Amino acid sequence: MEKDYILAYDIGTTGVKTCLFRMDSTLELVSSATKEYPIQLLPNGGAEQNPEDWWMAMQSTTKDVLDESGVKKEFIQGISFCSQMQGLVLVDETFRPVRNAMSYMDQRAGLEMKTGILHGLKIEGINAIKLLLSLWITGAVAASVKDPLWKYKWVERNEPDNFRKVKWWFDVKEYLIARSTNQAVMTRDSAFATFLYNSRKGKGNWSPLLCKLFGVKREHLPKIINAEDKVGGLTKESADFLNLMPDTPVFGGGGDASLIGVGAGAVTLGDTHIYAGTSGWIGTVTKKRTVDINARIASIVGARDGYYNYFGEQETSGKCLQWVKDHLALDEIDLYLEKKKITDDPDSVYESLFEFMFDSIKDTEPGSQGVIFTPWLHGNRCPFEDPKSRGIFFNISLHTGKRVLIRSVIEGILFHKRWILELSNKKVKTSTSIRFVGGVARSSFICQMLADITGKTIERVEHPENVGAIGAAAIVALGLGKIKKYEEIKRMIPVDKTWTPNPNLKTIYDKNFSVFKNLYASNKKHFEILNS
């Protein structure tokens, strides 16, 4: 047992976090390392990354965790991935990218979406035939300009020379799996996120009808596998590059929307988790294919075959706190003037700077003196799809200071989560106790605020910032046969701490929340004027 280790690669928007786990009755985090890389934000709404940056970051972080832990590479029983989703990585027959990867944040494909689905007889603004066929076959619809289907069509229209070289359409982790094993596969959750996957009972394959309907070449789509399936072993070339053993088993893994819930221990029917990292979401495990077109919430295919996450996404969550740190907090609360010990690695910076920032506002009053912030700094997806929406500080007075503004940002992020939670509950009942995970969940201050604002009991697991990697490691344990079924994952990931709501704060939060929900409708036309 002392030789049973798993390597899990969490491929995020801004960096790779590589975690080494020891398998026992629980998954014990032995060592972790992070390597950041850039994202190119282009003036036309583009957001791109160089896939080589992911691969190089895997190499350096693998070396770091093995060096720090002293664990021999021979003891690594398997590797897998948790990654950002809905990227577009188009590669040639040698698995070489034909262009930079298009991030999930990329918003360039407005024309492609308009011509592809926003024409003719419409339901909720979407072509009726394509909407109904998509809902029937896949259980959702490509209703966002950021969906990879429209990115694919954008490359086809705008870069025909690149498009002619394409052999495979991958998401982020699928590219890294191919680089590791020379195998072209796609896990079910990634396949679903293309909105070309037939998720009906007994199907679970690519839909030729949807490919034809949207003009996608079926031959670009790879073989579909389960999260816990072994794809193959590391090739000698990739093993030498990563300094691991050739033939080390590589498992399918999953996207962040699938595996963060697994890593949170929210794996049984009806379990709800809330994630707050750069982005955020609410997910509840269900066996039903359910969609709420009005609220932009749908059952997405999860890591476990036959199960879904009823899922509503928040475009910017912790990213709003980063904006506060960078642009609002520094002078007023002397964030950098305090002689705190701040090291260079991102985790330490987070703990030092953010915890100090939260401590500085602990005495501000709940409700932020009636100031309300809308956390739509990069548009929004749920419960409304609008890339033009933006952040607002509403109801500022002469008495409003920066500490109140900072608290209002946190409350705004959490109001939005409550909004998605309440809309989710209309169709799929959310659990009374909710697992809260992601980098933001490291703050006990915010955990208590989330309990107070939602009225739910909030549970946090150990290392909530690493739950994507924990989920990937749990999948490897399942694939290796160390555990036999998904339900056993829950005991491997116990609750570390719990918060219950303060009933005395319900009235003030309810009042602010009622105003918060109306701010988008009141300002939609203004966003359109200013941000077109």
Image (spheres, grey):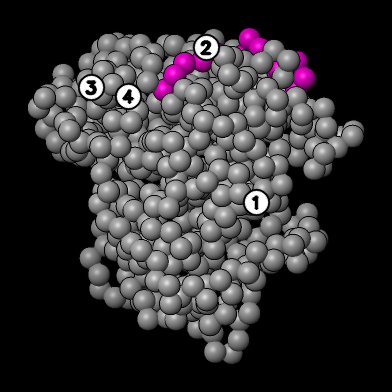
- Do the numbered discs 2 and 4 sit on residues whose CB atoms are within 8 Å? no
Q: Amino acid at mark 4?
A: Lys
* Residue hosting label 4: 485
Tell us which disc is closer to us: 2 or 4.
4
Q: Which of the pair 190/38 is nearer the observer?
A: 190
Q: Distance between the Cα atoms at labels 2 and 3? A: 26 Å
Q: Residue furthest right?
A: 120
User: Which label is found at residue 482?
Assistant: 3
Q: Decide if residue 467 is on the left or right side of residue 255.
A: left
Q: Amino acid at mark 2?
A: Lys
- Do the numbered discs 1 and 3 sit on residues whose CB atoms are within 8 Å? no
Q: Distance between the Cα atoms at labels 1 and 2? A: 33 Å
Q: Distance between the Cα atoms at labels 2 and 4? A: 24 Å
Secondary structure found at label 2: strand
Q: Residues within 10 Å of mark 3 (few under 14, many from 20)?
A: some
* Residue hosting label 2: 223
* Residue hosting label 1: 383
Tell us which disc is closer to us: 2 or 3.
3
Q: Amino acid at mark 3?
A: Lys
Q: Earlier in the sequence, mark 2 or mark 4?
A: 2
Quick check: is 396 in the magenta stretch? no
